[in-house]
Amino acid sequence: MFALTRKQKQVLGLIYDELSNREIADKLDISIRTVETHRKNIYRKTGATGIVGLIKYGLNHRLLQ
């Protein structure tokens, strides 16, 4: 496991808030492609295989409230 970057933590939080890739991109002023790359890297770093795994990781590591 590797530590998430600040931007990846932001994306994870917005995923938790149920925002779409488009909404995340608009909120962070980045492209949808960049959001997709962040998501891919978050999955790789956390070892999660689905959205539930990502949320569990975020909650267990106190990255989400």
Image (tube, rainbow, N blue to C red):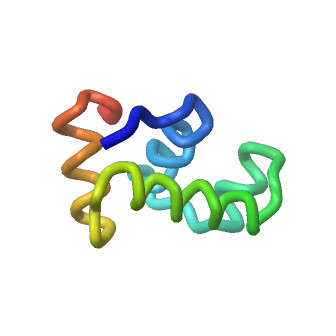
Q: With 62 as the anchor, is 17 left or right in this view?
A: right
Q: Residue at x 30, y 43 (%)?
A: 1
Q: With 11 as the anchor, is 24 left or right in this view?
A: right
Q: Position of residue 33 (x, y in %)?
A: 75, 67
Where, quadrant-wise, is the C terminus in this rendering? top left
Q: Position of residue 43 (x, y in %)?
A: 40, 60
Q: With 61 as the anchor, is 12 left or right in this view?
A: right
Q: Residue at x 17, y 37 (%)?
A: 60
Vertical position of residue 42 compared to residue 9: above or below = below
> Can you name the residue that lies furthest to the bottom here?
50
Q: With 54 as the anchor, is 29 left or right in this view?
A: right
Total number of numbered discs in the rendering: 0
Q: Position of residue 21 (x, y in %)?
A: 63, 66
> Can you name the residue that lies furthest to the front here?
1
| Rendering quarter of residue 24 | bottom right
Q: Position of residue 50 (x, y in %)?
A: 30, 71
Nearest the viewer among 20 and 46 is 46
Q: Residue at x 41, y 59 (%)?
A: 44
| Rendering quarter of residue 53 | bottom left
